[in-house]
Image (cartoon, rainbow, N blue to C red):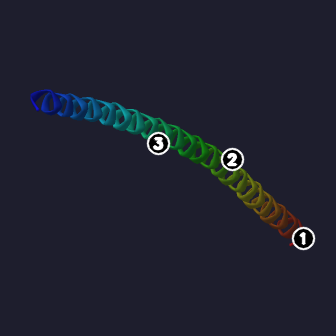
Amino acid sequence: MVVTIITGIVALLIGFLIARILLKKGIQDHEQIAKQQAEKILKDAESQAELLKKNKLLEAKEKFLQLKAEHEQEIQQKKYSSFST
């Protein structure tokens, strides 16, 4: 009778330890996957930010060139109108 109780307690402890080890391993695996996903999200966000930055710089340069051309055209018109009068 005592041997059965001791065997049951030992089996229970072994089962508890195995469950704890498996749970810890599962948590570590889940944590690793989450870290990898976070790194991928950050990398994608950085790529998108860089692309957006390049596009905005290009738009700003185009706007600058457009304004510069308009300004030069106005100057030329003023020069020609002052020569005409």
Label 2 to label 3, Cα distance in Å?
30 Å
Q: Which residue is mark 2?
A: 54
Judge the density around disc 2: few (<14), some (14-19), many (≥20) Cα neighbours within 10 Å.
few
Outermost residue, left side: 2
Which residue is label 3 attached to?
A: 34
N-terminal of the pair, mark 3 or mark 1, is 3
Q: CA distance from mark 3 to mark 1?
A: 74 Å
Q: Which residue is mark 1?
A: 84
Residue type for callout 3: Ala
In this view, 59 is above or below 78: above
Q: Secondary structure at mark 1?
A: helix
**Measured from the top left, where is residue 77 in percent x and y?**
84, 67
Q: Please give the name of the residue rendered at 38% of the width and 38% of the height, measured from the top-left corner.
A: 27
Q: Which corner quadrant holds the C terminus?
A: bottom right
Element under disc 2: helix
Residue at figure coordinates x 41%, y 38% from the top left: 26
Between marks 3 and 1 in the image, the one whose residue lies nearer the viewer: 3
- Residue sitting at x 53%, y 43%: 37
Q: Is residue 81 above or below residue 23?
A: below
**Percent coordinates x, y for residue 21 in the rendering:** 34, 30
